[in-house]
Image: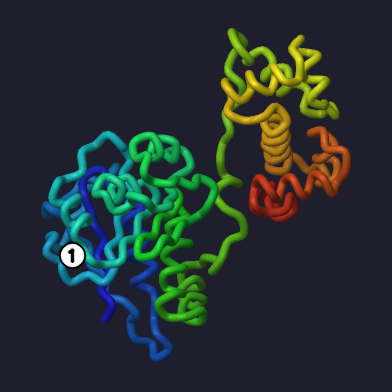
Amino acid sequence: MHQVVVLAYDGVIPFDLSVPVEVFGRARRADGSPAYEVRVCAVTDEVRAGAVNIRVPHDLSAVAGADTVVVPGVADLDLAVPAAVLDAVATTPARLVSICTGAFVLAASGRLDGRRATTHWAAAPELARRHPTVTVDPDVLFVADGPVLTSAGAAAGLDLCLHVVRGDHGVAVAADTARSCVMPLERAGGQAQFIAYEPPAPAGDGLQPLLAWLAENLHRPLTLADIAAHAMMSTRSLSRHFRDQVGTTPMRWLNRQRIRRAQQLLERTHQPVERVGELVGFASPTAFRESFRHIVGIPPRAYRAAFPL
């Protein structure tokens, strides 16, 4: 039987630890037999996991017999992971799966070098900073790069584990497992729809006053020339300053801010979708829908359905 070994260590996030145990533990073949044997292992008999301590039944020798090794996330990214855990991850020939910030453990072991990966959107910039050889995609729910699979934060671990079940045993087994978990087999969109974008910083040097002005005028049909005129710059100078200080173009920044405001309106008001598009400065419903889908990954109506009032 396919053995799934879940690594536990001090600081592990309890939810991340429970997700693979539940999903793989609930998976059943067509004849009703278990699809996986799931084991939890650690360096010590007990690990600290947030508000609880967890007794662990197996030591790291369980990794030797694993077909799949799952690395859950850790709450404190600066907490040292035991060297024995890193060594086990670095040397196992098993398929590797990380949940949330478990990607940091894979990266620290060298198993993400040259690979594409994801993690919780809030931790994605730090993963990219610490491990520049890893191509970090912060917008997706999970990444499958050969035998190494990584998920975004929290509930995205469910999506990845169900994806693994589907690949191992087919759609029918995966669908039954998803129903048992009261979870859709596939979710629309990526984690881009859940990212909390920070508002412009308080007024000060550089472009901050301009960014604040733009955020207050999202409803206006602003052009690049309009923005440059307000900033008292040429369009070429404005674009150069934006690239240097913000990392994108003025219109792309403005478009993302409009979509973020639209997300807030869809989450918190009963305004019709077409009216939401008008309120954030889109000239037509079609332009709003296309831009929203491009940035968020799903249409505005589907996004609203995920946040019932």
Q: Where is residue 74 shown, x and y percent of the image?
A: 31, 44
Disc 1: CA contacts within 10 A as few (<14), some (14-19) or many (>=20): many
Q: Is residue 158 left or right of residue 71?
A: right
Q: Is residue 3 left or right of residue 167?
A: left
The amino acid at mark 1 is: Val
Mark 1 residue element: helix
Q: Is residue 303 above or below residue 196?
A: below
View extreme (bottom): residue: 31
> Quarter holding the N terminus?
bottom left
Q: Nearest the camera: 130 or 114?
A: 114
Residue at x-position 58% and y-position 18%: 201
Splitting the image into 4 quarters, where does residue 234 fall?
top right
Q: Is residue 52 above or below residue 189?
A: above
Residue at x-position 36% and y-position 43%: 133
Residue at x-position 46% and y-position 68%: 163
Q: Where is residue 83 shown, x and y percent of the image?
A: 14, 46
Circle 1 residue: 63
Q: Where is residue 290 shown, x and y percent of the image?
A: 76, 49
Splitting the image into 4 quarters, where does residue 71 fall?
bottom left
Residue at x-position 43% and y-position 88%: 30
